[in-house]
């Protein structure tokens, strides 16, 4: 346990971890500000909606679009009416008729739509989290790989083993620290993201959500965090066995390409075992859908989200077992 | 019980393109408790590999090693009593010296006060906050020694601790090691600086090509390895050499026209008479000094050469020094 906390302390003291954390803070603050700036406040929305209401009243009174004036029957934006094809043109109805009422309501609606009211509702957060997950997972992968890769690079592993020679203990402590750091960074990023977007939702949108939304969002965040932790562990295991951060990242990049090629071109059935498809299915909570293998004309069974999570956890377990065996057996320079 | 015990240690490294390199070839070694033990040998003789095997960093191909009675699998039971420095110290380059020691010390519950004390003891108190990567080789070496001292160990295993140190630093380390040995600790010192080792070691083992060629108390090794020689100088050294050879002495030319004559101290009179009879008069006659270097070179006859630049022992056949890279064509052959 002491070794685990030492590893955590060391990881948190690393410049790359601090730099990534600072970068995340900066990025999410900037993102929060951008979202806040481009969305409309309640007053702005009221103003825009008010102008369309005024327009509707003016229309009913005949002050705009007086009877007989040509108008576009479809949304051509600001395009001059006289240049619009005749089949898309009509004339404004007489004042005081029901037809005029429908006509003005419709024109006000067009105007309202053209006002481009931008709001940020908190329910969008789920999509944002899902969209950011691949990127943040890559960061977790890098953190996990570089934790041990940097140590091999500096030659510190040998020094450490002269203080704690139980290699399995050292390896598992480091792996646990890598997984913790990967997951913590992910949670930290999600909290930052939520915090950065919250003012926009409060002042330029809505924090109201349908029943079940928060549970659903927490579920997505939890699964995404688990995926990031697993990825960090994988990065650690590969970098530990290859004794290089770069090699580990290159290897996972290669696996991602092969994974895609095999699934798309060679064997559709492989999708059930594809690391990336299982990862995506797990994070989204949808699992992997059943599909037809066009090469063999057979039905490829799908997989539930929970089962997809187990598959990626199994990959991690295999990599960690191989990494432990390698770390235990090989000489340390 | 010996502090370090090595029995029939053999270590082979596989080469990438096939074949194997034999680093240690059946080494037997016993390091007694207390004092400073010198572990000598030229570069590539297997010193560091032996230390790695003893510390559990490398697995022996055959044979056994024990440190404080513990085999590599049980090292964790004794590692708290052992401080070590293997080759060039390795720490995190982007952490300060102090933080590096704090993180290492945390594994064993070593507090910050101890870290400060150790930094002061190795002369890094003022540079403790600087990044490790900004340290000179000598400072890195000092930090490595500091890390080894942090556990207040019974046994210190130091592999070339004087590497990169300036003369003042070498003197400090020498005095530090001597004081540690006098405190009752066992200091296992691997080095190729024979003069240094001779000054501070109580026991010594000499390694060549992966095997131990002699070991024991320094005085015993010097006595046993002593090649009885007299240094003879005369104005006509070539003629003097011919006369002495005719008188039955073994003669080889030394530097500055000095002749190294294989003879005991008691043979001085015979040498003087033989030369005087031929009207050759001595300008100097004295017994040759015996030191670890001469013993080492005598024992490893023809196997090593002394680098004229740094004094390192280089395996024969090398055209350049394995330590400093200097050309060794003019090196003194043993």
Image (cartoon, coloured by chain):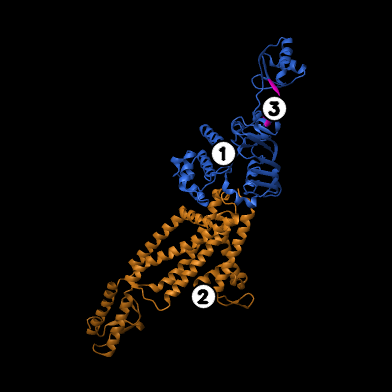
Region of the chain picked out in magenta, as a range? B220-230
Label 1, residues with CA under 10 Å away: few <14, some 14-19, many ≥20? many
The correct choice, above or below, for B333 with respect to B4 in the image is: above
A216 vs B113, nearest the viewer? B113
Give the chain of mark 3. Answer: B
Q: Earlier in the sequence, mark 3 or mark 1?
A: 1
Instruction: Indicate the position of residue B122 as horizontal and vertical percent values.
Output: 49, 39
- Say which mark, if any, is on residue B161: 1
Q: Which residue is mark 3?
A: B226
- Can you identify the residue that label 2 sits on? A286
Residue A128 spot, x, y in % from top left: 43, 69
As helix, strand or loop, the secondary structure at mark 1 comes to loop
What residue is rendered at 67% in x and 46% in y? B65
Colour displayed for chain B in the image of the structure: blue
Task: Locate the N terminus of chain B by quadrant.
Answer: top right
Quadrant including the C terminus of chain B = top right
């Amino acid at each position: 346990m002491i070794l685990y906390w030492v590893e955590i302390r060391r990881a948190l003291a690393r410049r790359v971890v601090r730099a990534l954390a600072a970068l995340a803070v900066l990025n999410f603050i900037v993102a929060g500000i951008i979202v806040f700036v481009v969305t409309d406040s309640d007053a702005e929305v009221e103003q825009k909606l008010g102008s369309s209401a005024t327009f509707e009243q003016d229309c009913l009174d005949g002050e705009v679009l007086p009877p007989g004036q040509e108008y576009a029957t479809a949304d051509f934006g600001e395009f001059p009416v006289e240049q619009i094809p005749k089949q898309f043109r009509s004339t404004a109805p007489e004042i005081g008729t029901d037809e005029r009422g429908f006509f003005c309501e419709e024109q006000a609606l067009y105007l309202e739509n053209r006002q481009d009211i931008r709001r940020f509702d908190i329910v969008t957060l789920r999509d944002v989290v899902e969209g950011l997950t691949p990127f943040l997972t890559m960061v977790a992968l890098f953190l996990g790989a570089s934790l041990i890769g940097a140590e091999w690079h500096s030659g510190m592993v040998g020094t450490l083993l002269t203080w704690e020679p139980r290699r399995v203990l050292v390896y598992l402590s480091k792996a646990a620290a890598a997984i913790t750091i990967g997951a913590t960074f992910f949670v930290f990023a999600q909290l930052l993201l939520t915090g950065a977007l919250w003012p926009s939702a409060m002042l330029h949108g809505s924090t109201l959500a349908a029943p079940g939304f928060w549970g659903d969002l927490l579920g997505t965040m939890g699964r995404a965090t688990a995926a990031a932790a697993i990825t960090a562990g994988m990065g650690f295991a590969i970098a530990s066995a290859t004794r290089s951060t770069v090699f580990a990242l290159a290897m996972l990049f290669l696996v991602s390409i092969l994974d895609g090629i095999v699934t798309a071109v060679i064997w559709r059935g492989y999708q059930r075992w594809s690391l990336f498809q299982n990862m995506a299915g797990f994070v989204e909570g949808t699992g992997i859908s059943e599909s037809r293998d066009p090469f063999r004309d057979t039905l490829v069974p799908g997989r539930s989200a929970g089962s997809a999570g187990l598959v990626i956890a199994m990959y991690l377990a295999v990599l960690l077992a191989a990494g432990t065996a390698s770390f235990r057996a090989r000489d340390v320079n | 019980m010996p502090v370090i015990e090595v029995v029939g240690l053999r270590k082979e490294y596989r080469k990438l393109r096939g074949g194997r390199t034999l680093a240690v070839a059946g080494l037997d070694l016993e390091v007694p408790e207390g004092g400073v033990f010198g572990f000598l040998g030229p570069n590539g003789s297997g010193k560091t590999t032996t230390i790695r095997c003893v510390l559990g960093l490398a697995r022996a191909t055959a044979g056994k090693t024990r440190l404080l009675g513990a085999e590599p699998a049980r090292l964790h039971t004794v590692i708290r009593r052992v401080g070590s420095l293997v080759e060039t110290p390795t720490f995190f380059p982007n952490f300060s010296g102090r933080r590096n020691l704090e993180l290492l010390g945390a594994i064993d519950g070593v507090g910050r006060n101890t870290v400060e004390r150790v930094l002061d003891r190795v002369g890094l108190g003022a540079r403790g906050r600087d990044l490790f990567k900004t340290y000179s080789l000598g400072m890195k070496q000092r930090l490595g020694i500091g890390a080894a001292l942090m556990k207040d160990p019974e046994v210190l295993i130091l592999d070339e601790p004087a590497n990169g140190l300036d003369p003042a630093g070498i003197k400090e380390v020498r005095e530090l090691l001597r004081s540690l040995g006098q405190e009752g600790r066992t200091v296992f010192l691997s080095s190729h600086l024979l003069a240094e080792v001779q000054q501070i070691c109580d026991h010594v083992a000499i390694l060549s090509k992966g095997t131990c060629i002699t070991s024991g108390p320094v005085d015993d090794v010097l006595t046993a390895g002593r090649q009885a020689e007299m240094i003879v100088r005369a104005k006509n050294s070539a003629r003097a050499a011919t006369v002495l050879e005719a008188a039955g002495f073994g003669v080889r030319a030394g530097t500055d026209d000095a002749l190294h004559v294989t003879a005991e101290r008691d043979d001085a009179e015979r040498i003087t008479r033989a030369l005087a009879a031929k009207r050759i008069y001595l300008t100097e006659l004295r017994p040759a000094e015996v030191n670890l270097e001469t013993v080492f070179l005598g024992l490893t006859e023809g196997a090593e050469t002394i680098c004229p630049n740094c004094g390192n022992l280089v395996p024969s056949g090398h055209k350049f020094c394995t330590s400093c890279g200097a050309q060794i064509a003019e090196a003194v052959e043993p």
